[in-house]
């Protein structure tokens, strides 16, 4: 399988590429070809990463290409991991950030639709990842060819962060926790919802039984975890972000026996307007994902979902002109 990774010279790229090449994402019997995209000024660093990949002598690594041309990077790609994005610079407003990234993701969405495998799976990691995925998908739809459902944003890091916090609170092993959901935007507004979560048949909500902890500790901890990592490490989350990307794509391609949170283009369920890339619970089987429908949304949850939806609707409005 051909895996295109953008931002290959960056810190997430450095945690991601070795794990893809070792078979952790697509399976231990699936050879991979890595197609690495980064900016012209980062090509030397990409070459350095490729030298290290060579030095691992991964049996599954069947080839590598480095390029600054999206048409080359996405050629015949089966999976595209869009990690590279424009970071927020000093004095940059959120609207400027959305526009700068809009320019990148319209080009990349078009290049994917024109060059990749028709069944390509796309995961956007680069922030603001939901809206970047929305933009790439909109650009791809204009070209046709690829499946518009297959343009995802990454909520899996929030999902994994929520699982760890719940494991610590309940004293139950992470592996025992099933049916976690994170609704909405990958931003502090996301709503991590453990109302359906089970641990060895026990309701996690009943085990926690502490609404104040949910509202005042759990949600802010998960929502602001990215900022807490930057504060502690001096750099943004990288290995955990790469790990979440591996989890998302592995479950999508190889399946999972648990619910997984994916940022997927809405089909209108849960009152989310069609096309908005929103974190929802999904089941993955036979290489397909399916949104889990019909979950009860209580008043508290609806309030939280409406806040994160409003943020995404505002982001959509801010990039609307670029998509005409
Ligand atoms: P980084 O700054 O270390 O690396 C970014 C790389 O992307 C650089 O090599 C840069 O040259 C490249 N790049 C920039 N524009 C590009 C373009 N148009 N085409 C190809 N490559 C391009 O950043 P890092 O730490 O690897 O993070 C990457 C992105 O992931 C950031 O936007 C960050 O906010 C986001 N992120 C998302 C998370 C999530 O849960 N969705 C979690 C953590 C980070």
Image (tube, rainbow, N blue to C red):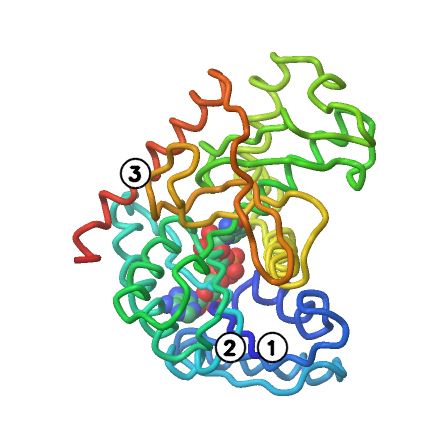
In percent of width and height, residue 115 lies at 39, 80
Query: Which element carries disc 3, helix, strand or loop?
Result: helix
**Image quadrant assignment for residue 110:** bottom left
Q: Is residue 60 above or below residue 135?
A: below
Q: Which mark is residue 36?
A: 2
Q: Are marks 2 and 1 in contact (CB under 8 Å)?
A: yes
Q: Is residue 223 left or right of residue 309?
A: right
What whole-number distance in Å separates the C-alpha atoms at marks 3 and 2? 32 Å
Disc with the residue nearer the chain's start (2 vs 1): 2
Q: Are marks 3 and 2 in contact (CB under 8 Å)?
A: no
Query: Which element carries disc 2, helix, strand or loop?
Result: strand
Q: Is residue 298 above or below residue 150?
A: above
Q: Is residue 168 above or below residue 292?
A: above
Q: Is mark 1 within 8 Å of ligand 1?
A: no
Q: Residues within 10 Å of mark 1 (few under 14, many from 20)?
A: some
What whole-number distance in Å separates the C-alpha atoms at marks 2 and 1? 10 Å
The total number of labels drawn is 3
Q: Is residue 144 left or right of residue 194?
A: left
Task: Give the labeled residue for mark 3.
Answer: 313
Task: Give the labeled residue for mark 1.
Answer: 49
In percent of width and height, residue 191 lies at 51, 30
Q: Residues within 10 Å of mark 2 (few under 14, many from 20)?
A: many
Please tell me which residue lies in front, 126 or 120: 120
Residue at 46 percent across and 58 percent down: it is: 124
């Amino acid at each position: 399988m051909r895996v295109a990774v953008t931002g290959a010279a960056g810190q997430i790229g450095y945690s991601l590429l070795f794990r893809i090449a070792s078979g952790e994402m697509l399976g231990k019997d699936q050879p991979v070809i890595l197609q690495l995209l980064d900016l012209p000024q980062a090509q030397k660093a990409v070459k350095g990463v490729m030298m290290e990949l060579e030095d691992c002598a991964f049996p599954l690594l069947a080839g590598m290409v480095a390029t600054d041309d999206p048409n080359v990077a996405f050629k015949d790609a089966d999976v595209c991991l869009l990690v590279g994005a424009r970071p927020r610079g000093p004095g940059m407003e959120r609207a400027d950030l959305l526009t700068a990234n809009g320019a990148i993701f319209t080009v990349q969405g078009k290049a994917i639709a024109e060059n990749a495998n028709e069944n390509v799976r796309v995961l956007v990691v680069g922030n603001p990842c939901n809206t970047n995925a929305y933009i790439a998908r909109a650009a791809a739809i204009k070209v046709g060819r690829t499946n518009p459902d297959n343009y995802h944003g990454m909520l899996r890091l929030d999902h994994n962060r929520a699982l760890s916090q719940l494991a610590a609170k309940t004293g139950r092993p992470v592996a025992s926790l099933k049916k976690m959901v994170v609704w909405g935007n990958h931003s502090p507004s996301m709503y991590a919802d453990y109302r359906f979560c089970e641990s060895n048949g026990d309701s996690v909500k009943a085990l926690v039984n502490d609404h104040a902890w949910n509202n005042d500790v759990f949600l802010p901890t998960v929502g602001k975890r990215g900022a807490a990592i930057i504060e502690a490490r001096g750099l943004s989350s990288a290995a955990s972000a790469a790990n979440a990307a591996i989890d998302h794509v592995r479950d999508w391609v190889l399946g999972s026996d648990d619910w997984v949170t994916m940022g997927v283009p809405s089909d209108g369920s849960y009152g989310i307007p069609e096309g908005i890339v929103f974190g929802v619970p999904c089941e993955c089987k036979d290489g397909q994902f399916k949104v889990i429908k019909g979950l009860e949304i209580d008043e508290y949850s609806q309030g939280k979902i409406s806040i994160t939806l409003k943020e995404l609707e505002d982001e959509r409005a801010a990039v609307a002109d670029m998509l005409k």
